[in-house]
Amino acid sequence: MTEATDTKGIRTRDLCLWYTKFQALINVTATIRPGLVTGLIGPSGCGKTTLLRCFNRINERIPGVRTEGTIEILGHDIYAPGTDLIELRRGVGMVFQRPNPLPLSVAENVLFGIKVHRCERLGRQEEHDVIEKALREVSLWADLKDRLHASATSLSLEQQQKLCIARLLPLKPRLLLMDEPCSALDPAATQRIEELIRELRGTYTILIVTHNMAQARRISDECMFMLLGELVEHRRTEDLFLNPADERTARYIEGRYG
Amino acid sequence: MTTKRRPQRSRLSRWGEFAIEMLIRACGISAVVFVFGIFFFVIREGWPFLVGDLNLGEFFGSTQWYPDSMSNKRYGALALIAGTVSVTGLAMLIAVPLGLGAAVYVSEFSHGRQKEALKVVIELLAAIPSVVWGFIGLVVLNPLIIDLFDVPVGLNVLNGALLLALMGVPIIVSIGEDALKAVPDSYREAAEAMGATRWQVTWRVLVPAARNGLLAAVLLGVGRAVGETMAVLMATGHAVNLPTSVFDSVRTMTATVAAELGEAARGSDHYCVLFVLGALLFAISFVVNLTADLAIRGVRRR
Ligand SMILES: Nc1ncnc2c1ncn2[C@@H]1O[C@H](COP(=O)(O)OP(=O)(O)O)[C@@H](O)[C@H]1O
Ligand SMILES: [Mg+2]
């Protein structure tokens, strides 16, 4: 069903991860196809966040984390020795569960990536263009164009989360990892973020963790179901929800696990 | 039986609570009373001279400090003020970069046992009494400065400033480290996930985020240095002198008060002027501490 030879998205093989002694991922083998929105569902504590955080290696901040197996992103083995973590993170953007804009101004948040990666030096006008483009893409420009120098932490949660997406865009990432990006938002804001994800679809490969099955059905093309650290099933979203192959998936979507 | 005893107990515990509350309130109020009391006392002792013969122009404008001259007493405190300012200023030039750098290192770049060890050592540094620092200035730094810089005396601005810097650094490090530690980890994670190096995270995110706390750390370090007496008394050479280089001996306001108060006759002009110096010091450190406090408040409001 999935092209096993596709090397443009993400491919993991026998991925295992331990938090010191506790094994949080067990032999996860998955292929995430480029240009699609892939949903990652499963009961709380099954390892969704952990899997997502392997793809930009941010898991390594936590002491005692050990990873085995391979992950290929855009054709590169990201756990190979000599991998440039900084380049990896430039191409793989992450949106967190709680909006976490940096405690700087809106403009500085958007420009942060460019400054950090020492891309070409931008003049004032160019900087302004970058900010406008990124904020337009997340439909924040109209709201914030007069508040570019306001502190990002003073925005509403919805605006903060959109800003957290916007600040990734100037680096032209290929892949966006989103960890329950709507869980801190109200239903109306959730709907608008979902719209935004639909607009970004195609331009970016998106992997989104969600706790909410209805949301997974609404926005994802393919869906992965995880349980207790294992990847149980990975198929087109409709198929997964309409006729799941695995009994555990069926039970989950009927609402029998947390 | 239990139902009979219960109300009695609760009355007892209510009394206990009331007593404890009163005690705590008394402690809180007494702190305020002490501060105002001390200020009042210092001002009162200096008052007769302050409103009487003190020539403010001379006090702030002249370097002629001859409080016990028989024929012509002069009370020009400029050299003493300059002594305090030069020693404190140089100390801060040394201590601020050192202290903030160490705070960043301890908070962001060291881990586990190394971090614990560093923190213990820094706290030990803070616990060294100032008279011991004075000894170090006399016995260690004095000959060292003479040798290294080929100057006739090693008891000078540089010596005092080095000691004050070493005394101020632990304060700056521990408060600065607290300020950095208080920055939520989600900021670090966000920045790292965007590809920032640890140094970039520190410089571009943590320092701006902890700005107020770091400022407070610096100001409390300054406050410590301004008010320090014993070490500078021993290490700066005790010469009333307007310094032109860091190798000049000076005398600070604190050292002057400490050295001369014992010999000044109570109620004399000399006695009073020392209290005026004290009030000036009090005012300086009050302003510094108030600024630090406002800066810390700024941190909390964020
Ligand atoms: N830092 C950590 N240290 C130890 N165990 C952890 C840590 N983070 C997550 N875990 C454990 O790993 C498992 C998977 O967690 P997580 O990936 O956060 O689940 P999910 O996102 O699906 O709710 C859970 O059992 C959790 O307790
Ligand atoms: Mg999670």
Image: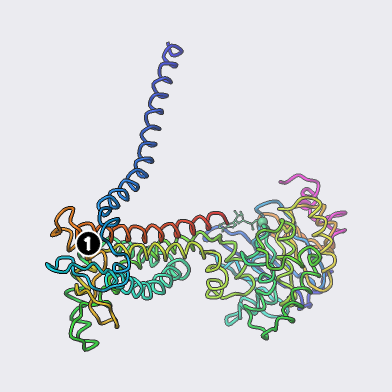
Q: Residues within 10 Å of mark 1 (few under 14, many from 20)?
A: some
Q: Is residue B61 above or below residue A253?
A: below
Q: Position of residue B221 (x, y in %)?
A: 37, 65
Report which residue position mark 1 lands on.
B257
In which image quadrant can residue B126 be found?
bottom left
In which image quadrant can residue B86 be found?
bottom left
Q: Position of residue B280 (x, y in %)?
A: 33, 60
Q: Position of residue B37 (x, y in %)?
A: 31, 46
Given the image, on which type of amino acid does mark 1 rest? Val
Give the SS element for disc 1. Answer: helix
Nearest to the observer: residue A32 or residue A62: A62
Q: Magenta stretch?
A: A237-258
Numbered-mark total: 1
Magenta stretch holds residue A184: no
Nearest to the observer: residue B144 or residue A225: B144
Residue B140 relative to residue A193: left or right: left
Outermost residue toward the bottom in this view: B150
Quarter of the image where the N terminus of chain A is located: bottom right
Residue B299 relative to residue B25: left or right: right
Chain for disc number 1: B
- What is the image's colouring? rainbow
Magenta stretch holds residue A253: yes
Identify the residue at horizontal 30%, vertical 62% (top origin): B227
Residue A130 relative to residue B180: left or right: right
Residue A219 relative to residue A109: left or right: right
In which image quadrant can residue A93 be found?
bottom right
Mark 1 residue CB less than 8 A from any atom of ligand 1: no
Q: Position of residue B282 (x, y in %)?
A: 33, 57
Q: Quadrant of ligand 1?
A: bottom right
